[in-house]
Amino acid sequence: MDAEKLKVLVGVFLIFLPLISSQSKYSKEKNEPKDKYKMETPFRMNKINLVWQKARKRIAANRVTDLYADLKFQDSMELDAKRKMAEGLDPDGAYENTVRRKFFGILDRYNLRELGDDSDPVAREVNEIHKPDEDIDVKLANMDPKIRKLMKQAELAGLDDEEMSDLKTELDHHQLRVDEYNVLKNEIDIMDGLDTNSIEDLKDVDTDWKYAEKRRKKLKEDHHSVKEGYERLELMAKKMASGTSNELEFTEPKVYDLWVTALKGNFSVQELESLKKELHHFEHKLKKHEYIKNEVLLSEASLRQSGQKLDGDSPEKHENLIKKEKDYQYKVKKYHTDLRTRIDKMLRHSEL
């Protein structure tokens, strides 16, 4: 290449260099959003933006990123609740109620309950949500219609204070399980809906694909727990509505099924009495396991309210509680299998 051609090429390059540079800069600026933590309205829901605008001026700087992540996830849940309502997918408002509880949990976590007077739309909504002395009718309003009917029958049966207290406690525990399940299910739905261009969104909610798999596994466990909770409430309501009888001797579904199976056999009175004592002992263990499971749920809720993440780096006390629950779960499962085997053997023997 001669010197003259080289000069021409260099000249052309110098002419187009500013244009190339500006296009590169434009592309970079276009693809890189402004500092999201300084934006006044980074979310799609106005309610969430109002909380963000007030909260970031009041909380410590090191908590702003956590608040943003929580509100980003809440924003997605609020939109999802709105969509479900519009499409008639939440006829009894159960999911909407879960989202509202989650929203109030965020306000509690960052000490944002006092957001102003009743003219503040966020404060107004918070006041509507927070009803600590919620009575049994309010709790039942968002429950399965079949169980709600059974509960009302039990209430009309003239329960004493202790029975009503037991009923309300079980309702509280069941509501906690349902709320946890709904929040977790929606979290996974959102993660499944993110595409490969949304990796940054995943980071915003402190998650990754490995974490997502762990959450799916927990969702399966929670689904089983909710199902058992429904069965327990149904059996409890039946017993309270009809009064104690031999058929409704037990309130734990697993124990009740074993007892009904045994009653179908040709057992002697002595054999049934012995089995009944054994089943009462088993029911006691199941109730203890249920108590431990509820302790785990309450511990998780407490950690969330304090802004801590449930990603495997939880406090030692919480991890020990989880281990205790898993160990007890294994023992209860083994006990149940042993009892089932013994009853089946007794049935076969009685048929001979």
Image: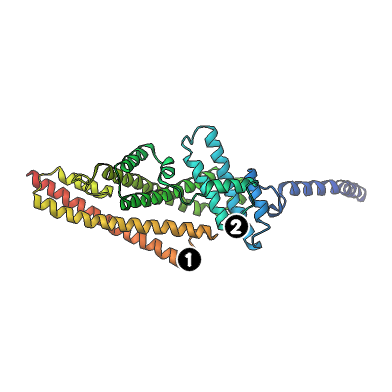
Q: In this view of the protein, which residue sits in the foreground, 236 or 335?
A: 236
Q: Amino acid at mark 2?
A: Asp
- Label 1: element kind: loop
Asked whether residue 298 is in view, the answer is yes
Residue 36: image x %, image y %?
68, 52
| Residue 99's disc number | none
Label 1, on which residue? 315
- Report x, y in % for residue 242: 25, 42
Position of 95 with respect to 281 (left or right) is right
- Asked which quadrant contains residue 331, the reply is bottom left
- Above/below status of 60 relative to 169: below
The number of callouts visible is: 2
Q: Is residue 307 left or right of residue 290?
A: right
> Residue 192: x percent and y percent?
52, 44
Disc 2 crowd rating (10 Å Cα; few below 14, some 14-19, many 20+) is some
Residue 323 location, quadrant: bottom left
- Which type of secondary structure does the marked residue at label 2 adopt? helix
235 over 111 or under it: above or below: above
Identify the colour scheme used. Answer: rainbow
